[in-house]
Image (cartoon, rainbow, N blue to C red):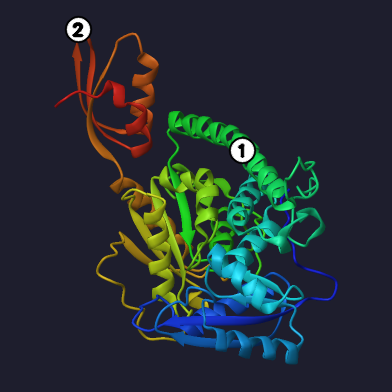
Amino acid sequence: MAHNSIVKTDPEKAFLVGVSVKGSRPLLSTSDSLNELALLTRTAGIDIVGQATQQVHHIEPATFIGSGKVDEIRQKIEDCGAQIIIFDDELSPRHQRQLEERFGENVKLLDRSALILDIFAQHARTREGALQVELAQYEYRLPRLTRQWTHLARQAGGGSARGGIGGVGLRGPGETQLEVDRREIRRRITKLKEELERVRGHRTRHRQQRTRAGVPVVALVGYTNAGKSTLLNAITGADVYVADQLFATLDPTTRRMDLPSGREVLLSDTVGFIQKLPTTLIAAFRATLEEITEADLLIHVVDVNHPNVLQQIETVEDTLAEIDVPAIPRLLAWNKMDLWSGETLPTLSDSHTYLEQIRVSAAAKTGIADLLKAIEQGLAVTSYHSTLLIPHTQGDLLAYLYEHSQVENRVDREDGVLLTLQLPSTLYRRFREYQVEE
């Protein structure tokens, strides 16, 4: 399993750096984003001993923040004894190299993406999750290899628990250690992609079986630490790991449950999102995130008490668009209402349309009945008015449709049985070959 852990018995000390560009309009202010970076840092098991912010007219091509600021931060690091500098943005390979040279080899340089990848590595509990994190780590690392990053297996964050890559290959004539490491990383990336493709095929077959069974899928999505896993536990009685920290659960969890009508559905909990999520991570987790794209209904879970709740909603919706999630009907679950002391709920952007907004508390298990009712109604919205021609030789399909859909009209013809019916979206895909023009 990829375990890019930087946690030690005595936690390392980090200095955080936030940058704002004049004229830019980020979702979160520099201060709020730096607070989130601090949460990520603590989640990774690292202590924080200082921080600095810098406002610039543009990102400086060589040092990101300007030579003067680099010198100022280097002095602060010496004063507070920090061993790690963490930037709140993803650094380009050029910035990474330049800053490593400026700060010196005694200080470890990380950016927000590397930190998130580390946390994912710590929390991946299944083989698929471990493969996906390891792939993301290597694809992130490949263009950033410097002399500091050679012999990767000997470093914290340098390789996988299966042995790493440093020193695996022997150097050929004239070949540098950097070139050896690059070659080994490319080889490992190819192997990981092949393994993940097999996992993806298994997932696809599993989804096809679910589609044939006609069981609707409801997916929980939301910002990290919004309470999705707690809500899954509250609804289904499952025992999914829950902790008050970012990315407490990483691997997707799916549980069967019955709605008040007795209808069976699958409720799936997915990885939480966060602003500035590394693109390599989104790409690596695409197979897992396909669970969202194939869902019949989404429940967007939000922490109503968070001061940046509206920005978190925007981040989740932007990420869903980035992974090409279609226009699946959505419910909005305002979670943690037991802690809510406001009078009116936050006002949503006009660009977001939800079938219904429900107030719940997953921890206190309140509002669950209202949410289940909304799920029932939401799945009804996802049904399609269809006309199917079922051959006489497939009477089992006919019986199945009567049981799992709402048949409005039947006409017995020589070439088969013509049904007009309301078809759930899961069955709509399965019975596409039998559809005829009305």
The percent position of residue 135, horizontal first and vertical second, equals 62, 48
The percent position of residue 396, horizontal first and vertical second, equals 40, 17
The answer to whether residue 339 shows anywhere in this view is no
**Amino acid at pointer 1:** Thr
The answer to whether residue 190 shows anywhere in this view is yes
The percent position of residue 89, horizontal first and vertical second, equals 52, 72
Q: Is residue 81 left or right of residue 55?
A: right
Q: Of circles 1 and 2, which is in front?
A: 1
| Residue ID for mark 1 | 190
At 64% from the left edge and 59% from the top edge, which residue is drawn? 120
**Amino acid at pointer 2:** Glu
- How crowded is the residue under tag 2: few (<14 C-alpha within 10 Å), some, or many (20+)? few
| Residue ID for mark 2 | 414
Numbered circles on residues, count:
2
The percent position of residue 357, horizontal first and vertical second, equals 35, 66
Secondary element at tag 2? loop
Mark 1 and mark 2: span between their CA atoms? 55 Å
